[in-house]
Amino acid sequence: NFGPSPGRMSKASTTFTLPDSQTEWIKQKVKENSLKDEGKAFRCVINYIAQAVKSDIFSADRLKVCKAEIDEKSLKVSYPLAESQESWIKNKMAEMKVGGSLVASAAVAHCMEVTNDEVFKVVRCKTNTTVKLAEMKGLCKEGLEAQAALDDGK
């Protein structure tokens, strides 16, 4: 379900059905990273996948596993998304001919396999989420500072 939620003009509340293990992982990341809410954690996931992941994380095998996990035990969740993030998900849905829940689940599944810092410790500018990687403007000032701090810690 895409569309603005009452009282929030800048972000639209989007509903997904995600496996329980993924919704629990998102809740855990909120606590670990002192994020405002689960929506913020999910937006970090989408920005990371859209901007930093160069490999195809939406393989037929991954989608099959995600579908099976959703069918087994899942939960409906709603997260507020910026227009650019919503657009990116819709583009992936059209490109892969699958529903938004599978796009979201595959994105979260990939993030569960990488380090916390890769997903949650780099500020990514949401305006880069819909652009092709080759056309990306790069990180905003805050993103450059966060990336530098992350690089210094390696």
Image: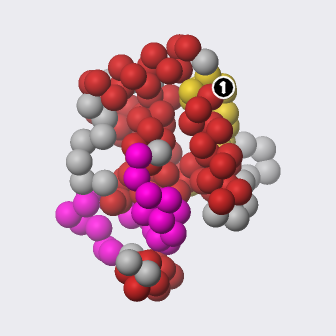
Depth check: give the residue in front, 116 or 47.
116
Is residue 125 one of those drawn in magenta?
yes
Residue at 60% x, 43% y is: 25
Residue 38: percent from left, percent from top: 67, 49
On screen, residue 121 versus residue 10, left or right, reads: left
On screen, residue 84 versus residue 43, left or right, reads: left
Tell me the quadrant of the picture where the C terminus can be found: bottom left
On screen, residue 92 versus residue 27, left or right, reads: left
Residue 100: percent from left, percent from top: 47, 30
Residue at numbered disc 1 = 75
Relative to 67, does residue 104 appear above or below in the rendering?
below
Residue at 48% x, 80% y is: 146
What segment carries the magenta color? 113-138
Residue 140: percent from left, percent from top: 43, 79
Q: Amino acid at mark 1?
A: Leu
The way the protein has been coloured in the rendering is secondary structure
